Amino acid sequence: MSIRRGGDTPNVLHGGQKDYKDIYFQEEGKLVVPISLQAGYGIVEAGTVIAENTSASGSDGKFVPYDPDATITGAEENTGRANLVQSTGGATSDLYVTIEDSYKFAVGDDVFIEDDTTAEENLGAITAIDRTTNTHMAKITVTTQTGGTSFTTARFAYINVEGAKTAKGILERTVDTGVGSTAKGALGVVLVANAVLYTGMINNLDTNAKSDLGNVATFGRYTILK
């Protein structure tokens, strides 16, 4: 009699079913482009405004959720931010985020930091990511130190990749980029023109994103990409 032995199947993640979300009112003639989304952002919803990682190296060219240019409240969703778990305390090259959030980044990614009070600062490229020294947080080391003013957790301080504040399009279908050490990224499709969308189905299409895209109009409860 043969014995069947169980085992794990590499790269297969099992989870709950995701309901479909339709962003379109009219899609005939739509213009879309395929993209590769950066790993570590979990489920990125259809209708999320998408940006491109423009780092000099690292994950340059991968796509990430757009980071809206608005007052930071800590309640924003689908932004791709990695909130600090420890305030900077002044000038430092070491930043601490959750271990899970650290997988949103790769060595070589250029990053910036800001909070709801202190203006954005460019920190240059990530030189190291330490996920082993502490069991509850990861240390991200950057090229350029933060300024003397502390970025604090009370003010929702976070880091994000260069390019995250420039909108490139709108994600057509929900994808799962993975979370933490098992994150693999995902293939997706971004809408760039020629469609009428339900405004309520779009995430983070703020004034700056509309300006970046350059082809957005509104009509009642609809958003038109020309």
Image: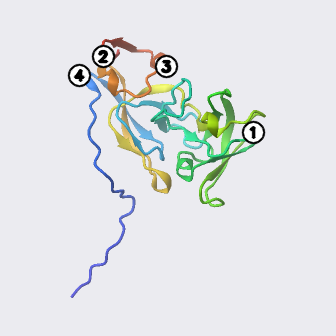
Instruction: Give the side of residue 30 with respect to residue 84, left or right.
Output: left
- Foreground mark, 2 or 3, reads 2
Q: Earlier in the sequence, mark 2 or mark 3?
A: 3
- The residue positioned farthest toward the bottom in the image shown: 1
Identify which amino acid the numbered label 4 is placed on: Glu
Q: Are marks 2 and 1 in contact (CB under 8 Å)?
A: no
Q: Earlier in the sequence, mark 3 or mark 4?
A: 4
Residue at image mark 1:
145
Residue at image mark 4:
28
Residue at image mark 2:
221
Q: Report the front residue among 140 and 32.
A: 140
Dot 1 surroundings within 10 Å: few (below 14), some, or many (20 or more)? some
Quadrant in the rendering for residue 27: top left
Q: Of helix, strand and loop, which one carries label 3? A: helix
How far apart are the alpha carbons under marks 2 and 1?
45 Å
Residue at image mark 3:
212
Residue at image x 46%, y 21%?
A: 206
Q: Of helix, strand and loop, which one carries label 2? A: loop
Q: Of helix, strand and loop, which one carries label 4? A: loop
Q: Earlier in the sequence, mark 4 or mark 2?
A: 4
Viewer can see residue 56: no
Identify which amino acid the numbered label 2 is placed on: Arg
Q: Earlier in the sequence, mark 1 or mark 3?
A: 1
Horizontal and vertical percent position of residue 183: 46, 52
Horizontal and vertical percent position of residue 215: 40, 15
Residue at image x 78%, y 34%?
A: 148
